[in-house]
Amino acid sequence: NEAGLSERFQHLKWAVAAILLVLLSIRGRAMIYAAWALLFAYFAVDDSIRLHERGGSWLARVLDLRSFEEIYLEHFSYFYLGAQEFGELIVAAGLGVIIVAVLCVAWPGPDAVREKIVTKRLIAWLGLFALFAVGFDMLHTMVWEIYPPAIELIGVIEDGGEMICASLLVAGLALELARFRAVSIFGLRRPQA
């Protein structure tokens, strides 16, 4: 249920992740964390108002993806994806291009070892999240046409995977902020790994 308690908790996790990254950006004076904060703020907004679904629907109409859907289904009827899903994939690809561009601009300098380590972890996390958010979402749609009894299982894997990924993200960022704060409180050298 998109308006259920678990979904609202998911929105909160995205917002908390964005706030933690803003705090890391301020404390560490590192733009890369601010760039990541923008992504998770987008996730919070997207999840709460279904932005990529609306964008996918709009693109399906504007780009006339129904004709593409017909051609696609002639050749790949066993991998059912409709115009709406193609629109959502275009939105996801566009977001991917923007993420890469922003991360390239904000990429830390050669001396920012810790920021690079955290960023590489976030990139790996993003890949895992995309597996559930995009991969299993599309598989969910395909299964609907191919093998309906598996719909519930795929839906649980998709939603559960997204929720676990978001929880791990928030926990990891909270630990990173705690690590950073411990270093500044006790006057220790900043951790490099």
Image (tube, rainbow, N blue to C red):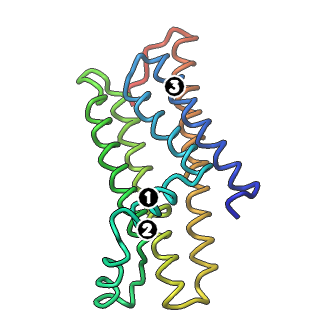
Say which amino acid is labelled 2: Gly
**Dots 1, 3 in contact, CB < 8 A:** no
| Amino acid type for the residue under numbered disc 3 | Val
Q: CA distance from mark 1 to mark 3?
A: 23 Å
What is the crowding at mark 2: few (fewer than 14 residues within 10 Å), some, or many (at least 20)? few
What residue is shown at x 26% (from left), y 35% (from top)?
104
Q: Which residue is mark 1?
A: 130
In this view, the residue in front, 113 or 39, is 39
Determine the secondary structure under disc 1: helix
Q: Position of residue 108 (x, y in %)?
A: 30, 26
User: Could you tell which of marks 2 and 3 lies nearer the N-terminus?
Assistant: 3
Furthest-top residue in this view: 187
User: Residue beneath label 3, please?
Assistant: 22
| Residue labelled with disc 2 | 135
The image shows residue 149 at horizontal and vertical percentages of 61, 89
Asked whether 189 or 97 is in front, the reply is 97
Give the answer, above or below, for where 185 lies relative to 161: above
Question: Disc 1 vs disc 2: Cβ atoms closer than 8 Å?
Answer: yes
